[in-house]
Amino acid sequence: ADVLEDRGSLQRTLTWRGAFWLASGVPALVLFSIGSIAATIGAPSALVWAVSISFGLIQAFVWAEIAGLFPNKAGGASVYGAMAWARYSKFVAPVSVWCNWLAWSPVLAIGAGLGAGYVLTALFPPDAVINTWHVTLVDLSGVKEGLELRLNAQFLIAVALLLLVFAAQHHGILRAARVQTVIGLAVLIPLLVVGIVPLLTGDVVKANFTPFVPISGAWNLEGWTLFAGGLFLAAWSAYAFETSVCYTAEFKNPGRDTIRAILSAGLVCLAIYILVPVSFQGALGVERLLAPGIVDGTGVAEAMTSLVGGGAVVGSLLVVMLILALLLTIMTTMAGSSRTLFQGSRDGWLPRYLGTANRHGAPTRAMWTDLGFNLILLLMSDYVFVLACSTVCYMIFNFLNLNAGWLHRVDSPATPRPFRAPTVLIAGGTVLAFVNALLLGWGANVWGAGALWSGLVAAALIVPVFCYRHFVQDKGRFPASMYADLDLPDPAGGAARPARRAGVLPYLVLVGGVAMVVIGQLLASAGT
């Protein structure tokens, strides 16, 4: 009964270089929220990015180790971390997979929406009918003031961009990696130019970083609350190069390729996430970063043109580069998030239909599900609120999976580890798990009063989804491959309970995580 029909499989055609280019859309994510964070935090916004990417680099060593434990799994850190929690709770483990997908998937909607906005801005004046018409479908002002589902030209162009990306990935991961190599070079080089040129020309001036206090005017509790909000939102971008380990089941040599892929992607992100915010703020000043066009992303190309001293031609090229950058992030996200759905289905967390791959090794049903979900998100009028809600889910995923690093060491000490992270970094990742939980409670509502609760409700939706798969489709048993991954006998004769060497510690960790969120909420309330 546990043997399903042959539903295709992923193919081992990828090297670490391919995974690096598949993750090359992550550096461009800095452009999604550089304006929003600067407008909310003020002068310390560049520090927010530096701290956040440093956190992400420490966490990368945890992801690299746990990925090596499961060379036949795809889907990223959430899948590998879920295996640690599966020993202790059927319901906590799928939260990891679900929250990772909910965190990543909205990049499709946000990226396609911004890309469509650039196309409209480049081709039509602001007051053109194509830019102003819209039809309100649903009023969501009860969730957040001004939020609605609407249909407009931006939505239609964004759908076309998503279908273009889908077509590029339909023929498997190797072809997608080759396409992204070309686009990645066209994006990363201009980003590095924008980050370096103002430093070389002396356009970055000290006055644009002073006074070095939050926009509230002082480093008081209100100021620290804004800083926490910045770290919260920046995490969604700065931690995201962990997507490079989504392809373990497609690596030719997973033991070698996994660590090389994530560290190479992390080092490039480290450079860009420090250089670009410093150059933007140092050359433009905080007041320029507060401009509506930079906050919503539509004026970033114009700002970049002024940074490198170009004219109309350079400005047009930068608009093209930004559109390519957004396509790159969409491709990165569709490749990674669809594999999370695919592996989640194969492991028994998500509905069966998602675990099917086509003859090219592409998880097309998961890709279509991603696409359909994001068509709904594209209708929303406030992408920053969508970003904040997805970051709530991302912080939940990070908390669970950073703790999975030490859990795997306790419960699977003898399992071969192609890469073994220094113990101090595993400990550092555990500390950052609780820091992320604190930022979740402290910083989420900086971006909207309902952001935290909306994100928590979205995370809780996994409960009925998992119950349907596990208790209705699978009659309370996991697929046989799951028991093998946990070193348990086949369940046909009644499986033994998995070893739980950590005792009650995992449950205490969950209680501690909730406590950190509550403390963060109390700090946020006192700081507003």
Image (cartoon, rainbow, N blue to C red):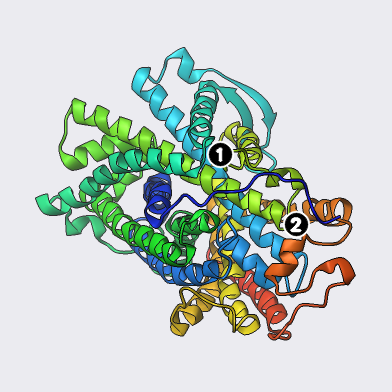
- Quarter of the picture holding the C terminus: bottom right
Check disc 2 and report the residue beneath it.
348
Mark 1 nearby-residue class (10 Å; few <14, some 14–19, many ≥20):
some
Q: Is residue 347 left or right of residue 168?
A: right
Asked whether disc 1 touches disc 2, contact meaning CB atoms under 8 Å apart, the reply is: no
Q: Which image quarter holds the N terminus?
A: bottom right
Residue count near mark 2 (Cα–Cα under 10 Å), binned few <14, some 14–19, many ≥20? many
SS state under label 2 = loop
> Residue 387: x percent and y percent?
54, 47
The reply to whether residue 389 is visible in this rendering is no
Question: Picture coordinates of residue 184 (x, y %)?
Answer: 34, 43
Secondary element under disc 1, as helix, strand or loop, is: loop
- Residue 358 visible within the image: yes
Q: Amino acid at mark 2?
A: Gly
- Decide which of tag 1 and tag 2 comes sooner along the chain: 2
Query: Furthest residue to the left?
Result: 201
From the top left corner, tell me how far across and down residue 410 is, in percent.
62, 84
Q: Which mark is residue 360?
A: 1
Instruction: Tell me the CA gap for discs 1 and 2.
Output: 23 Å
Residue ID at (51%, 25%)? 160
